[in-house]
Image: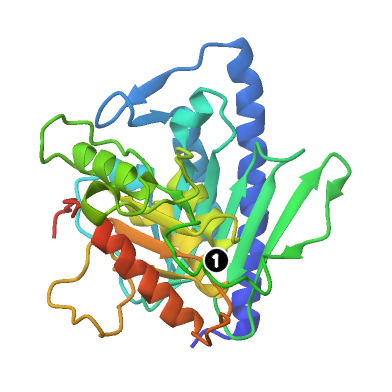
């Protein structure tokens, strides 16, 4: 059993290493403006890796190995370079790290880039730290400890040092009565760009149009959301839902390192994350289970308060999940088992 004091120690250590990694990235971007730094393709032309990705992952891995040598470690770049492609998360204490989520953004100097460091116990994201080094003066830090005595925080850093940490959205407002109408919806196009009637890209396009269309449109699938946002970083999408700056994240095709830290923050702020495909055989009134962190499909709903009709947060969230499921195509993303 990990105590709250131990989790606070892990949290503070993680915040520190995330900021140090962010400082490296900021300096790397200064060099990038004066020198043409190379990028390499992994899957295709939108799946990029830079030397900074591997350097930051090594920086984080070495710090964790020195401080917590008994813990396991899963990093995007080491996983991508290795031969073992199965889902590696076990119940033992495990760090799950994306050194740079939003590499394409960073290459284009678009600020939605994040260092994502999650810590799991019993396969549940328990500590999450996300540092966006190019947001705010010297970066913005989102973090949480998922625990009854934990918390969730956002800190902005300026040239004169960190500002006072502020708790994330408390208390959160109820969800819109007719949600998804009135919601802000986040989703990504993803790296799978194959062009066919049943491709994930085509289905995602259909889903985005469905959610944006007027109520009653598209055969009753219109969602009339206030807007759709695609930030180029699943980590930042999840963080904005966790912080109450968006309502729905519908994502598939990303990996556990893209969402682990954000899920810890989301859970601590009262949000939920389920499979973006409805589970087979789920009864209409059955409780909706949490998403498998390694399942590559995630539907996140922000935390909320009891509404005027007396509906609990969970009732509102699960109703919205089913409304999103009703309006969206099933996406097919698999991984080796």
Residue sitting at x 28%, y 30%: 42
In this picture, is 215 found above or below 308? Answer: above
The residue carrying mark 1 is 265
Which residue is rendered at x = 77% and y = 38% of the image?
137
- The front one of 229 and 90 is 229
- Secondary structure of the residue carrying tag 1 is helix
Q: Is residue 21 left or right of residue 205?
A: right
Colour pattern:
rainbow
Residue 124's quadrant in the figure?
bottom left
> Which quadrant would the C terminus be assigned to in this image?
bottom left
In the foreground, 204 or 182? 182
Q: Position of residue 330 (x, y in %)?
A: 18, 55
> Where in the figure is residue 93, as x and y percent of width and height?
43, 73
Q: Judge whether 31 appears above or below 223 on screen.
A: above
Observer-nearest of 305 and 6: 305
User: What percent of the width, then of the height, locates residue 288?
Assistant: 30, 78
Q: Is residue 85 left or right of residue 98?
A: left
Please indicate whether residue 152 sits to the left or right of residue 275 in the image.
right
Q: Residue at x 62, y 70 (%)?
A: 173
- Residue 274 visible in the displayed image: no
Mark 1 burial class by Cα count in 10 Å: few <14, some 14-19, many 20+: many
Q: Is residue 1 above or below residue 280?
A: below
């Amino acid at each position: 059993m990990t105590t709250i004091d131990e989790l606070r120690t892990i949290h503070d250590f993680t915040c520190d290493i995330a900021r140090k990694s962010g400082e490296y990235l900021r300096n790397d971007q200064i060099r990038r403006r004066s020198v043409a730094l190379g990028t390499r393709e992994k899957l295709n032309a939108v799946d990029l890796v830079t030397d900074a990705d591997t350097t930051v992952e090594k920086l984080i891995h070495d710090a964790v190995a020195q401080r917590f040598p008994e813990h396991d470690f899963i990093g995007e770049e080491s996983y991508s370079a290795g031969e073992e492609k199965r889902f590696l998360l076990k119940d033992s204490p495990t760090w799950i790290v994306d050194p740079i989520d939003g590499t394409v953004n960073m290459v284009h100097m678009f600020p939605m880039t994040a260092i994502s460091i999650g810590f799991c116990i019993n396969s549940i994201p328990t500590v999450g730290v996300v540092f966006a080094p190019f947001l705010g003066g010297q970066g913005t830090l989102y973090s949480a400890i998922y625990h009854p005595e934990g918390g969730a925080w956002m800190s902005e850093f300026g040239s004169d040092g960190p500002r006072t940490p502020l708790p994330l959205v408390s208390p959160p407002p109820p969800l819109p009565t007719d949600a998804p109408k009135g919601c802000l919806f986040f989703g990504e196009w993803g790296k799978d760009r194959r062009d066919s009637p049943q491709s994930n890209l085509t289905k995602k396009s259909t889903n985005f149009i469905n959610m944006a269309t007027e109520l009653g449109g598209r055969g009753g699938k219109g969602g009339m959301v206030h807007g759709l946002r695609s930030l180029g970083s699943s980590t930042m999408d999840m963080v904005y839902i966790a912080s109450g700056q968006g309502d729905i994240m519908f994502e598939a095709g990303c990996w556990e390192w893209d969402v682990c830290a954000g899920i810890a923050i989301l859970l601590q702020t009262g949000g939920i994350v389920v499979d973006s495909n409805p589970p087979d055989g789920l009864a209409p009134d059955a409780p909706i289970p949490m998403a498998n962190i390694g399942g590559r499909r995630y539907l996140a709903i922000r935390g909320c308060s009891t509404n005027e009709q007396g509906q609990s947060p969970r009732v509102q969230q699960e109703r919205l999940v089913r409304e999103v499921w009703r309006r969206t195509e099933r996406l097919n993303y698999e991984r080796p088992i």
